[in-house]
Amino acid sequence: MFGRRRNASDRDSGEAGAAPTAADLTAEAGTEFAGEVPDAAARRAGGPWDVAEPHTDMQRVDLGSLQVPALPGLDIQLVFAETQGACVVVQHQGSELQLMAFAAPKRAALWDDVRAEIAAEITGGGGQVSQRHGPFGIELLARVHAVPGQPQSGVRPVRFTGVDGPRWFLRGLFSGPAAENAAAAAPLEALMREVVVSRGDHPVPPRDLLELRLPPEAAQALAEEQARAEEQASRFATQPNPFERGPEMTETR
């Protein structure tokens, strides 16, 4: 869920139905947002890290644009979905953190606009959303349909966080107990702090997903497994019998 891109006419016209801005959402939050909001650099002082920055030395799983810490008790998966592209999913005791990295402009942050777009998409779909200060800056708390588009399926809590880096944007989506419970979220937040983003030097349009890939050893193991499956299938395939009579045609005069 990334939300609809707003164009200049949406931002300037003030017409009904236009996606709310980050300022609109902050104003709606009232006293919860009293005080100065730290800028993007300050929020990222303790990570996540850019690959070019000094960062803590620990074992990480190299998934291309994201290098994810391999911490005890956390299960890391690379998920490929047709609708939204590839993402990293980290699971811990019933909670889940979905990580997606996007290209960003050189001199502009994305999270303010993306946050407003996500909020508009959730409310437009019948969900509820609010925002607060969290460990990564302003974040969204939402209650959405358990099955998208099916109100009768009930609701589930989710929590969106965003981090603007140098030419990249990292979005985190917490679900399960970690969406509402600070203790359940702590291990996943610690992992997100230690994620390293490798933007690469090749040109990528802003908001496009950065490439994710399996580690070389995992890709090789997957290829070998697929080859074995294909060999097994061909071994047990029914071979044609050269002595079996083929189809016959009867001619009636």
Image (cartoon, grey):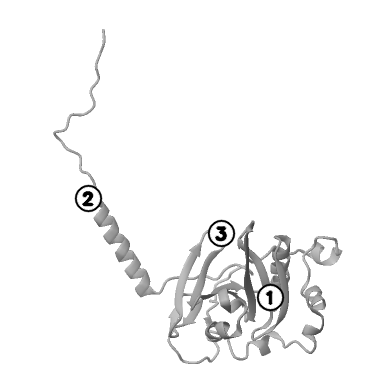
Q: Which of 125 and 213 is in front in this view?
A: 125
Which structural element holds mark 1? strand
Which structural element holds mark 3? loop
Viewer-nearest of discs 1 and 3? 1
Where does residue 77 sit, x and y in percent of width and height? 45, 72
- Image disc number at residue 83: 3
Q: Return the residue found at the far left.
A: 243
User: Could you tell which of marks 2 and 1 lies nearer the N-terminus?
Assistant: 1
Which residue does the numbered mark 1 point to in the structure image? 140
Instruction: Identify the residue at horizontal 72%, vertical 81% (top origin).
Output: 132
Would you identify the image quadrant in which residue 136 lies? bottom right
Q: Are marks 2 and 1 in contact (CB under 8 Å)?
A: no
Which residue does the numbered mark 2 point to in the structure image? 236
User: Which residue type carries mark 2?
Assistant: Phe
- Image disc number at residue 166: none
Task: Say above or below: 229 vs 161.
Answer: above
Where does residue 23 sit, x and y in percent of width and height? 80, 76
